[in-house]
Amino acid sequence: MGIDCPPVTGRKILLLQGRYRLIKRIGKGGFCKTFLAVDEGQFPPIPCVVQELLSECETSKTFEQKAQSLEELGKHEQIPALLNYFQYQQHFYLVQEFIAGRNLAQVVAEEGVFNGTQIWQILEDLLPVLQFISDRHIIHRDIKPENIICRTPPNPKGEANLVIVDFSTAKIVTEIDCLIADNNIGSPEYAAPEQTIGKAVFASDLYSLGVTCIYLLTQIPPFDLFDVVNNCWVWRDYLTTKGNIWQQETKNLRLTKILDKLLQNVVSQRFQSADEVMQAMDIKSKSQDLKLPNPLWHCSSTLTEYSVVSSSVNALVFSPEGNILASTNDEKNIKLWDLNTKKVIASLLGHSQVVKSVAFSPDGKILASASDDKTIKLWDINTLTEICTLPGHSHAVKSVAFSPDGQILASGSWDKTVKLWNVNSGAEICTLTGHQLQVNSVAFSSQGQILASASYDRTIRLWQINSQTEFKNCPCYTLLGILSGHAWAVLTVAFSPDGKILATGSDDKTIKLWEVYTGQEISTLSGHSWSVIGVAFTADGKTLISASWDKTVKLWRLSTTEEIVTLSGHTDSVSAIAVSQVTQLIASGSKDKTIKLWQLVE
């Protein structure tokens, strides 16, 4: 689960049931050991998590009941599926789905304290899960940052990114539980007072969630956030921004009150259910409002990838003339589609790994492609041959963009840098550094003087790019500013045609609009239920198109920032978006292996 631990040592049994090979231990509690394992009974072998429960805390009957309950819980997309369970010698074993990603303890250690917006979203994502758990008469009893995994995107089911793991200490509540005290199970720093004396209730998990939140806000151990003498929490004193200033924002003041009630020592003064917390937050049902069909747009064509092994469509771009669509998928090639015949007219081969971005030069004569193989390739569209390969990045290249004059190519990489290239010579001009995490997207303004780069570090950087004739007298770039405001990774950027507005899409499910020359946030567009992976403007600059892992494409009216219509039809996450600048046509690519063309009906 993203934890670096030594391999299993000193154990006689490394292979359980003849199929589950234990690789390394990734967790240990008082009554449970957790291992990363590989299920060799599958082909190819798949990773899984094996939990070893000691007989001191389970009987055969309670273990069977717990396993049956975990099977039911595992149907929720934010809880690992239970794959198998069995008893061997003196131990009980649970085999669960492996969730790739980092736990919140790792996230805060690597990226620093969370802000109020992030904490609010954590509550939005996790409260429905806790309600789901309690509705099935189960108390988790070990909610803490280490047991909340931030799933590596994308979530194929298009739901929330956070997953609650480790149900080894979970308890099934019965009518007589109020009369019987259990062992003190859980993590003392995060356990509610009643849980420490063996009297856990449903609200105990809410208390632990509250403690988790104040730890993420401060990165201070919970024991140090509690004033024993005065019997109260003092977490505000440890905020990076002083508590009274932090609370001046209306939403943070509201969040503070919610956290305070989650952290009440007396159970009766605490929120009694996750639903009650959600009501206090005005969180509505996640089911989407039904929308009437929009008569102006329809899916005119569906382009199907013909290869059996073909998978997610990773990138799309229209040629400047609007007659060709370039697409990439997991087959490591680039396909060129004739939009008149809707047929593939060429397939460009050469990359050794998946191609993640493509861009046409302004004159349409060159296609640039960026790949996980750490290189960029330039292709001659007339001859359909490779012009050159641009090496230099030390990690996967995720985005490429041409300057409006076609003389400079920018590339963004997971090596945390942006590089500028001379298109004519293929030479590297310079490297732009400063992002703390991977760079996901780059885009030039229409005038070509400003380059925007988006990163997993939750920021967007704006760079002033000088013309090549000026390079001899001054640096090729100047950092103009850093835009901050997204709660999670920024995945995509696009400039409006006049270069005055920058649109950004994020893992936090929102699109933000920024005033380029002041760096001020104009507005936040909410409506998608999962990560926004693509944004693009129409040629007239009046409409913004966004694509999301929630399987939809949305159109927004810039003048009012209202949602115009949602284009639905893909059966899996939308993974790419492109807008023709000469025709009323939108292309969307998906993990369902198709490209859909959406036509505006005049």
Image (tube, grey):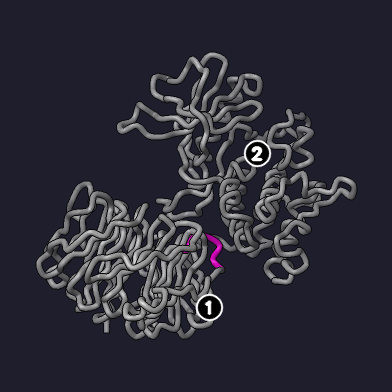
Q: Residue at x 26, y 55 (%)?
A: 329
Task: For label 1, count other residues whose C-alpha is less than 10 Å away and answer few (under 14), some (14-19) or many (20+).
Answer: some
Can you name the residue that lies furthest to the front here?
Answer: 473
Residue 244's place in the image compared with 16, above or below, is below
Q: How many marks?
A: 2
Q: Nearer the viewer, residue 21 or 157?
A: 21
Any part of residue 290 in sight: yes
Q: Answer whether residue 429 is magenta in the image.
A: no
Task: For label 2, count other residues whose C-alpha is less than 10 Å away and answer few (under 14), some (14-19) or many (20+).
Answer: many
Q: Position of residue 525 (x, y in %)?
A: 50, 73
The quadrant the C terminus occupies is bottom left
Q: Amino acid at mark 1?
A: Gly
Q: Residue at x 37, y 75 (%)?
A: 444
Left of 513 or right of it: where is 114? right
Q: Amino acid at mark 2?
A: Asp
Q: Position of residue 214 (x, y in %)?
A: 70, 53
Q: Name the chief secondary structure element in magenta.
A: loop
- Please tell me in which quadrant of the rendered image residue 473 appears: bottom left
Which region shows up in magenta?
485-490
- Please tell me in which quadrant of the rendered image residue 571 appears: bottom left
Q: Nearer the viewer, residue 528 or 224?
A: 224
Give the CA separation, mark 1 to mark 2: 42 Å
Q: Mark 1 highlights which residue?
A: 519
Q: Residue at x 48, y 68 (%)?
A: 460
Please identify, in this view, whether the residue under mark 1 or under mark 2 is nearer the observer. Answer: 1
Q: Mark 2 highlights which residue?
A: 142
Q: Please tell me whether mark 2 sits on a helix, a strand or a loop.
A: loop
Any part of residue 566 in sight: no
Q: Nearer the viewer, residue 465 or 567?
A: 465
Left of 485 or right of it: where is 324? left
Can you name the residue that lies furthest to the right here?
Answer: 229
Q: Position of residue 345 (x, y in %)?
A: 11, 64
